[in-house]
Image: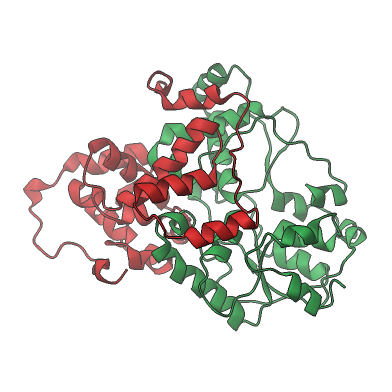
Chain colours: A red, B green
């Protein structure tokens, strides 16, 4: 981590209110079903989060960006991708905000709007997992990891671990597939994506 | 499944179940996450509870089921998509809920290998944490301790029982997961534990593969130690799959010959 640990603070430069996007917060509320404005920045989320050290902004600081309408800063933060949705924050949040639901909304918006993704490696990993589900209806861990390592050009990282796991039969060589794979694979194609829910 | 058999419960695997999408689906695509869970719900026969082992699957299934049960439009959409009815009254039960309802006498009757003197720390990871909308659901804090103590083990208190294991960061960003896992395992060793018992299979895996400490202790999934205690066939053979083999510990504690 080291150098990429920011001060977890808001931008130190002055915020130009004219550049703030007033609709951003409402959009995040609508997508997440939560109310970002409820956050009063008590920082309990940051106190409990096991991952703050790896984030550029604390979770509540991302919400501050949303409250201020700083769309680009919020969607390009590493926090939204580092968050694993473990809910440690949301059980402690005195305002009962579903923090991971807001992170989900921000992640979806970041992908849709094509902003610069702060953690492309994490997105690549998610894509590999979803690709496996699209192909088999289930996850084939060995293939996911091999494809991911190739995409990341980390040819040898974890190779020894993978071999150890294979020899102990912790990883299956062949995927477990569902009987009706088209039922799941069509969820990934354009036409079946229609529908409100 | 063998554990449940020993307790007199007969399980039937959900026919053609699919992956609920884990962290990746809800991180990338809300609708996909909902629909992957909905397919599983459409496969569940009505009138029987759906038993779930993984805490994340449980959340995904419960959240999707909540939408379907409360919103007729969403239910109609998914029933049309899958061509199967979805029971709005379907009971979704975690393995822990099942265990907490088992009579202590039944556990005692199933006990073949008492865990006498085995010092364990319970590890729940993120399982006890959930989104505010599921806050009023039953909570299983203390269940691992309660059951393991009733089976003869000694449960120790420690600081990391509810610390997240790193989930997918273990694969995508090992540099973040390693210090986290080391802190957890180091905490268990410091508390005097001889092994860690986890509530989730992925936690078990992450704690095993991402620990770089010299001083390591075995990590067992709750169902593995129950299978061992109940003398389920093949349970000790299964242990050899672990990266940190628990067999030397079990031999040293004279729990197996």
In the image, farthest residue toward the right: B109
What residue is drawn where x is 44% and y is 36%?
A131
What residue is drawn where x is 83% and y is 67%?
B151
* Total number of numbered discs in the rendering: 0
* Residue A156 drawn at (x, y percent): 42, 58
What residue is drawn where x is 43% and y is 27%?
A188
* Residue A69 drawn at (x, y percent): 19, 47
* Residue B226 drawn at (x, y percent): 78, 60
Q: Is B16 in front, or is B101? A: B16
In the image, residue A120 sits, relative to residue B208, either above or below, namely: above
Q: Is B83 in front, or is B203? A: B203
In the displayed structure, does residue B74 sit left or right of residue B193?
left
* Residue B241 drawn at (x, y percent): 68, 59
The answer to whether residue A102 is visible is no
In the displayed structure, does residue A100 sit left or right of residue B42?
left
In the image, residue A33 sits, relative to residue A183, either above or below, namely: below
Q: Is B19 in front, or is B102? A: B19
Which quadrant is home to the N terminus of chain A? bottom left
The answer to whether residue B199 is visible is yes
Which quadrant is home to the C terminus of chain A? top left
In the image, residue A3 sits, relative to residue A85, either above or below, namely: below
In the displayed structure, does residue A137 sit left or right of residue A61?
right
What residue is drawn where x is 52% and y is 61%?
A161
């Amino acid at each position: 981590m080291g150098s990429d640990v920011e001060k977890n603070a808001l931008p130190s430069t002055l915020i130009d209110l004219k550049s703030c996007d007033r609709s951003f917060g409402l959009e995040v509320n609508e997508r997440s079903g939560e109310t970002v404005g409820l956050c009063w920045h008590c920082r309990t989320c940051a106190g409990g989060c096991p991952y703050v050290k790896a984030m550029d902004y604390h979770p509540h600081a991302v919400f501050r960006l949303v409250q201020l309408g700083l769309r680009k800063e919020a969607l390009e933060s590493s926090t939204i991708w580092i968050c694993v949705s473990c809910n440690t924050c949301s059980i402690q949040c005195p305002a009962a905000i579903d923090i991971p639901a807001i992170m989900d909304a921000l992640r979806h918006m970041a992908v849709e709007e094509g902003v610069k993704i702060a953690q492309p490696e994490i997105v690549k990993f998610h894509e590999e997992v979803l690709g496996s589900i699209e192909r088999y209806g289930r996850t084939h861990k060995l293939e996911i990891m091999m494809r991911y390592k190739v995409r990341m050009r980390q040819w040898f990282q974890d190779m020894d671990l993978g071999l150890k796991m294979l020899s102990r039969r912790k990883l299956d060589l062949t995927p477990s597939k569902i009987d009706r794979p088209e039922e799941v694979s069509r969820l990934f194609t354009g036409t079946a994506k229609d529908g409100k829910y | 499944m063998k554990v449940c058999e020993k307790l007199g419960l007969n399980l039937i695997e959900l026919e053609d179940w699919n992956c609920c999408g884990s962290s990746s689906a809800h991180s990338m695509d809300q609708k996909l996450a909902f629909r992957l869970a909905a397919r599983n719900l459409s496969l569940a026969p009505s009138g029987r509870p759906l038993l779930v082992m993984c805490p994340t699957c449980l959340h995904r299934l419960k959240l999707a089921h909540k939408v379907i049960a409360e919103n007729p439009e969403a239910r109609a959409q998914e029933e049309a998509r899958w061509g199967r009815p979805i029971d709005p009254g379907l009971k979704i039960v975690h393995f822990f809920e099942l265990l907490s309802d088992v009579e202590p006498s039944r556990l005692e009757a199933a006990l073949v290998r008492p865990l006498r003197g085995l010092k364990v720390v319970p590890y729940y990871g993120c399982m006890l944490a959930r989104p505010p909308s599921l806050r009023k659901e039953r909570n299983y804090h203390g269940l691992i301790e309660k059951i393991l103590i009733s089976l003869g083990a000694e449960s120790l208190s420690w600081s990391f029982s509810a610390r997240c294991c790193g989930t997918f960061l273990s694969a995508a960003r090992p540099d973040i997961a390693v210090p986290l896992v080391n802190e957890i395992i180091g905490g268990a060793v410091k508390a005097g534990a001889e092994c860690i018992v986890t509530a989730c299979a992925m936690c078990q895996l992450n704690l095993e593969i991402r620990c770089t400490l010299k001083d390591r202790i075995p990590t067992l999934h709750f169902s593995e130690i129950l299978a061992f205690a109940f003398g389920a066939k093949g349970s000790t053979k299964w242990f050899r799959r672990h990266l940190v083999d628990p067999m030397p510990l079990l031999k040293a504690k004279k729990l197996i010959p």
